[in-house]
Amino acid sequence: MMRNLSMNRMKCIIGVFNSNWSSQTGFIFKQQGIVVNSLLRRFATSNPVSTPSIEVVDVTLSNGLENDKSFIATNNKLTLIQSLSKSGIHRIESTRFLHYKIAPQYIDALDIVTKINPLLIDSNSRSIVSAYVPSLAQLQNAIRHKTKSICISISSTSSFSMHNYKTSVDNHLLVLSDLVSFAKDKDVSVRGRIQCALGCPHEGEVDVERVKELIQKLFKMGCYEVCLEDTIGKGSVESVKMLVEGIKAENEIEISRIGMQLKNRSDGLGLLNALTAYESGIRVFEG
């Protein structure tokens, strides 16, 4: 549910984008301060009834642990999900269904999805907990363990698709179409994610029309929302604005159904990209 945000809630959301920045240069903190103050001023001076609300999809446990070599105890992950829910973040991507040899951090995916919903029900939480599912076999496994919301991903470029999924974009679309069809038959909601929407490590700049085409295909499959991911952190104010404005052109795509995941930047401008996305009409952010 979309909700208007108080100042404290806005500060929490700023923290999502502002966390884990390692640089200590004065320039970076100056840039952060400018953007944070700009965000807070906008929300502080706006009428709380008319202020467009934003929604955070927390992907800490799904995207944030991939490269962590130390296994984090399942109970600690469950505790984090409960804490996020209590803090007011009601959409949480809790885990990934991947082979343990590829991603040992997610060997407990079944435990997470099996145990978390009873815990949230007991605490009267309204949070929706989802999981990343890459294949039909993994989806069937997730559904057997009561998963009711999933996320799927596709690359915007052929090179990244071959590197990440060992298949072409077109073939991957066929796989995902079967997956989404099965999910919908089982009353499982599906959220899409497009990787490299703001640049590819192999092919460089990505054409906006290509991203639009993939968005429309994911919606046609049955995704209720699509997130555009700045996978390699190359997004800029200009490229973010160009992408969002291009998506809005001709009113072919409902901007309310588009989210963005914008990476923290070593130059401190990741949060400025988020502000640009917000000003261009984005209201859903992964963090």
Image: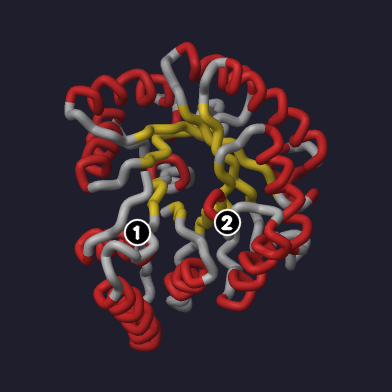
Total tally of numbered discs in the picture: 2
Going from the N terminus, do you reach mark 1 or mark 2 first?
Answer: 1
Kindly identify the residue that appears in the image at 73 percent across and 62 percent down: 250
- The percent coordinates of residue 206 (x first, y second) are 74, 63
**Depth check: 172 or 178 in front?**
178
Kindly identify the residue that appears in the image at 67 percent across and 61 percent down: 247
Residue 168 seen anywhere in this rendered image of the structure:
yes
At mark 1, the secondary structure is helix
Quadrant of residue 25 in the image?
Answer: bottom left
Amino acid beneath label 1: Val
Kindly identify the residue that appears in the image at 56 percent across and 38 percent down: 224
Screen quadrant of the C terminus: bottom left
Q: Give the vertical position of 7 relative to 172 (above or below).
A: below
- The percent coordinates of residue 70 (x first, y second) are 37, 40
Residue 265 seen anywhere in this rendered image of the structure:
no
Label disc, if present, on residue 35 of the rendered structure: none
Disc 1 residue crowd, few under 14, some 14–19, many 20+, Cα 10 Å? some
Label disc, if present, on residue 255 of the rendered structure: 2
**Depth check: 268 or 53 in front?**
53
**Depth check: 132 or 178 in front?**
178
66 with respect to 24 (left or right) = right
Q: Where does label 1 land, which residue?
A: 16
Q: Give the vertical position of 137 relative to 81 (above or below).
A: above
Amino acid beneath label 2: Ile
In the picture as drawn, the residue positioned furthest to the left comes out as: 123
Quadrant of residue 111 in the image?
Answer: top left
Screen quadrant of the N terminus: top left
